[in-house]
């Protein structure tokens, strides 16, 4: 079997609800924010699965719930055939060596009181991977791998630019030699000129170390460049999932079509004759999602059934998954 077709991460009907409470002393639960509301997908070994959608749709929460940084409300997450949702203590700690995260904000995700050497070496301490005498050497090696001067180990985060800080975050994620990395909008806080450098670095590291990525972003042109397959999320649910070429050449869900119509095309002739899909209204609140299809309140192609029945998540052929009554 081709290793790239082997499923490394399997997400089944994942839900992540955050309680809404009322009262100061005696708090009572009066509702839920349905950040992730019953999604299912696979991530294959050594592939990059892009996860896109508007801000607040639940992308980052999905990544954290997969890694068990948030304990899911319902559903299951399997990593290499083992369920993570009921795993605790030492077994979960050992499993976490194989899964890491690169955070969105390189300014907030690095401890300003720790040196770069301590930041990158901390995972090695936590997992007791190697003797302390060899850790400095390993940290310098990691700095070199991500394109930084290995003699920066005694510097502090404030001495680095945003792009350099994100490289430090990448080095920290690589320290324990993981198989799977959740990249949570790793370039959105960076200058455009630096974004391409970080994307190229991630691609080189994937090639060198056989990494598997869940790449979370809202920039569809970046996702097109780095991803093998792309999943589109709206208000806590997946609406479409397919390979990169199929999604960009033949989007099936009205929301995906609207997102792609907003991506600029460098050819001015094509750009002038392109039809834009402008979505009307605001995104509904995840605390009170609409009945039926979540997207029906803004959908330009909605049917009467869309108001009442939640569409089924189905494969319409060739691994192209869509949740839409128009199919």
Image (tube, rainbow, N blue to C red):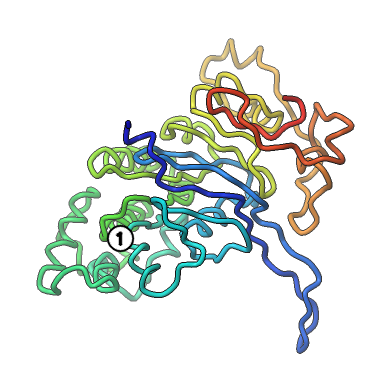
Between 263 and 155, which is closer to the camera in this rendering? 263
- Identify the image quadrant of residue 61: bottom right
Counting from the top left corner in percent of width and height, residue 7 is at: 41, 42
Task: Please give the name of the residue rendered at 49% of the width and 22% of the height, measured from the top-left corner.
Answer: 245
Q: Is residue 317 found left or right of 153 in the rendered image?
A: right
Task: Please give the name of the residue rendered at 32% of the width and 32% of the height, measured from the top-left corner.
Answer: 1
Vertical placement of residue 118 versus 172, above or below: below
Disc 1 is placed on an element classified as helix
Between 26 and 72, which is closer to the camera in this rendering? 72
Counting from the top left corner in percent of width and height, residue 263 is at: 58, 28
Between 102 and 233, which is closer to the camera in this rendering? 233
- The residue beneath circle 1 is 172
**Residue farthest to the right?**
304
- Identify the image quadrant of residue 22: bottom right
Task: Please give the name of the residue rendered at 34% of the width and 65% of the height, measured from the top-left corner.
Answer: 158
Task: Please give the name of the residue rendered at 30% of the width and 54% of the height, measured from the top-left corner.
Answer: 178
């Amino acid at each position: 079997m081709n290793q790239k077709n082997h499923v490394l991460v399997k997400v089944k009907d994942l839900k992540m609800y955050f309680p809404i409470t009322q009262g100061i002393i005696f708090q009572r639960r009066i509702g839920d924010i349905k950040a992730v509301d019953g999604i299912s997908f696979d991530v294959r070994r050594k592939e990059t699965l892009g996860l896109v959608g508007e801000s607040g749709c639940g992308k980052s929460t999905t990544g954290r719930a997969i890694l068990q940084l948030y304990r899911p409300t319902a559903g299951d997450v399997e990593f290499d055939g083992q369920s993570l949702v009921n795993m605790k203590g030492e077994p979960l700690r050992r499993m976490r060596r194989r899964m890491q995260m690169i955070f969105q904000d390189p300014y907030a995700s690095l401890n300003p009181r720790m040196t770069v050497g301590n930041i990158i070496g901390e995972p090695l301490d936590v997992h007791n991977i190697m003797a302390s005498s060899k850790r400095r050497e390993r940290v310098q090696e990691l700095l070199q791998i991500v394109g930084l001067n290995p003699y920066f180990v005694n510097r502090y985060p404030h001495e680095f630019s945003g792009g350099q800080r994100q490289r430090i975050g990448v080095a920290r994620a690589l320290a324990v030699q993981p198989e799977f990395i959740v990249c949570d909008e790793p370039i959105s806080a960076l200058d455009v000129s630096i974004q391409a450098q970080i994307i190229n670095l991630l691609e080189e590291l994937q090639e060198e170390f056989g990494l598997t990525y869940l790449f979370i972003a809202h920039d569809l042109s970046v996702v097109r460049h780095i991803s093998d397959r792309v999943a589109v999320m709206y208000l806590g649910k997946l609406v479409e999932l397919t390979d990169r070429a199929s999604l960009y050449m033949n989007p099936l869900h009205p929301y995906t079509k609207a997102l792609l119509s907003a991506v600029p095309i460098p050819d001015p002739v094509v750009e002038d004759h392109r039809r834009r899909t402008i979505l009307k209204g605001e995104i509904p609140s995840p605390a009170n999602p609409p009945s039926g299809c979540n997207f029906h309140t803004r959908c330009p192609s909605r049917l009467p059934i869309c108001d009442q029945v939640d569409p089924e998540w189905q494969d319409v052929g060739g691994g192209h998954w869509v949740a839409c009554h128009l199919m």
